[in-house]
Amino acid sequence: MHMPERIYFDHAATTPLDPRVVEAMLPYLTENWGNPSSIYAEAQEARRGLDGARKTMADLLGCRPQDLIFTSCATESDNLALRGAAYANRKRGNHIVTTAIEHHAVLHTAERLEQEGFRVTYLPVDSEGFIDIEELEQAVTPETTVVSIMHINNEVGTIEPIAEAARAVKARNPHTVFHTDAVQAVGTLDVNVDALGVDLLTIGAHKFYGPKGVGALYVRPRTPLQPQQLGGSQEKERRAGTENVVGIVGMATAMRLAYEEFDSRNRLYRHLHDRLIAELPEAVPYTQITGPRDPAKRVSHIYSCCLGYVEGEAVLLGLDLAGIAASSGSACTSGSLEPSHVLTAMGLPLEMARGSLRLSLGWDNGEADIDRLLEVLPQVVSRLRSLSPTWPERSGAASP
Ligand code: PLP
């Protein structure tokens, strides 16, 4: 039996390893296995790999190598940023500002800090997922020690005005530490820490064709940060634990390739995204595109929409059976039937939010993948709608 090739549309959840990244990692799995903190010859190759990776990433981000802390994932970086800055600044105040649409790595950390006695303001967003700078300014007080606003929303692709937000926060309170979760931005945009004006910035390698289980946190010099993981004196005593040298070498290689290639990658994503915007709502009636309408204000590798009169999870299962991998939002919320906190914060009615679909593109996607999706999705959706008691065309009722 001929099995059609599978099509992967979930690159915002994770990407496959770039073969060039695997190539760069291999020597650190085989010959260069020493502990980078040791002083003998075997360790020196590992140390060189670690130092080289730190320099590569620092040059790309526009910072000094010593301003980067390597971590085990973006979630750890987010936890370290929020908890580390909140506790290190506790004598100045106990107020934190974040947004209602952050990844759970930030939201659940903020909720835990609330339980520990901090006060947290969750900024609302508009119907396209943008924060309002005036609302941010009003939220920041002399007591505010940390502001955390994501660079790109992982569900709808909204690019938040981070440089403007950081400027506004610093003007209100120069002591406030500004963190951005740039997990979906690094590898897609030309992220530079000075252009953004941020103090802390989170990176996760597996979103840009690097390995899983490795991330980084940029820390601007003199930013107060209390270590959250204690032990050895690695990472200048800001994050204990022997570094994952092979993962870090892979992350730096993937990041260098992403910076070298993001013009060509983004050209492809933009073209495929434009097709989805133009053709998907035509192919599937009662589709509402979510996220910013202005292409300059959203990333092109994330397309998101809500399909009326269906459950997103049922659509995903139908697509999977037809060989297509997609998501209903963030990977962490799929598997639960709760509508996405991002879509509800953007004001989508619950019935629409339940039908969310996210297609996130990678360089391995092409025209034929979009053609196949546009052939399969209408069939999956109309089968599900025909079973739905609320489907208006079932009883011949008028369109909403
Ligand atoms: N932040 C954002 C915006 C993300 O999209 C993700 C992953 O989806 C994370 C943080 C967490 O990344 P990880 O699970 O690799 O720690």
Image: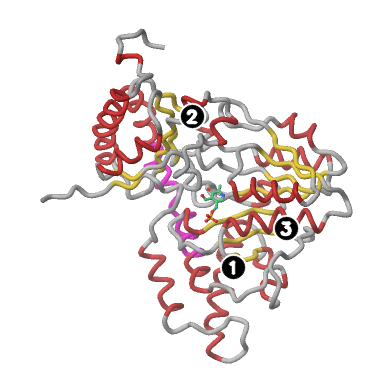
For marks 1 and 3, the one nearer the N-term is 1
Three-letter code for the amino acid on which mark 3 is drawn: Arg
Disc 2 target residue: 353
Where residue 120 appears, as percent x and y from the top left, is: 75, 42
The foreground one among 212 and 113 is: 113
Front tag of 3 and 2: 2
Cβ–Cβ under 8 Å for marks 2 and 1: no
* Helix, strand or loop for disc 2: helix
* Residue 262 falls within the magenta-colored stretch: yes
Where residue 238 appears, as percent x and y from the top left, is: 71, 68
Disc 3 target residue: 220
Taking the image as shown, residue 17 lies to the left or right of residue 183, namely left
Q: Residues within 10 Å of mark 2 (few under 14, many from 20)?
A: many
Residues in magenta, as a range? 251-271
Q: Residues within 10 Å of mark 1 (few under 14, many from 20)?
A: some
Q: Where, quadrant-wise, is the C terminus in this rendering?
A: top left
**Given the current orientation, which residue lies at the most extreme bottom position?**
40
Question: Cα distance, mark 3 to mark 2?
Answer: 38 Å
**Given the current orientation, which residue lies at the most extreme left position?**
1
Three-letter code for the amino acid on which mark 2 is drawn: Ala
For marks 3 and 2, the one nearer the N-term is 3
Front tag of 2 and 1: 2
The foreground one among 223 and 147 is: 147
Question: Cα distance, mark 2 to mark 1?
Answer: 43 Å
Where residue 36 appears, as percent x and y from the top left, is: 58, 81
For marks 2 and 1, the one nearer the N-term is 1
**Given the current orientation, which residue lies at the most extreme front position?**
389
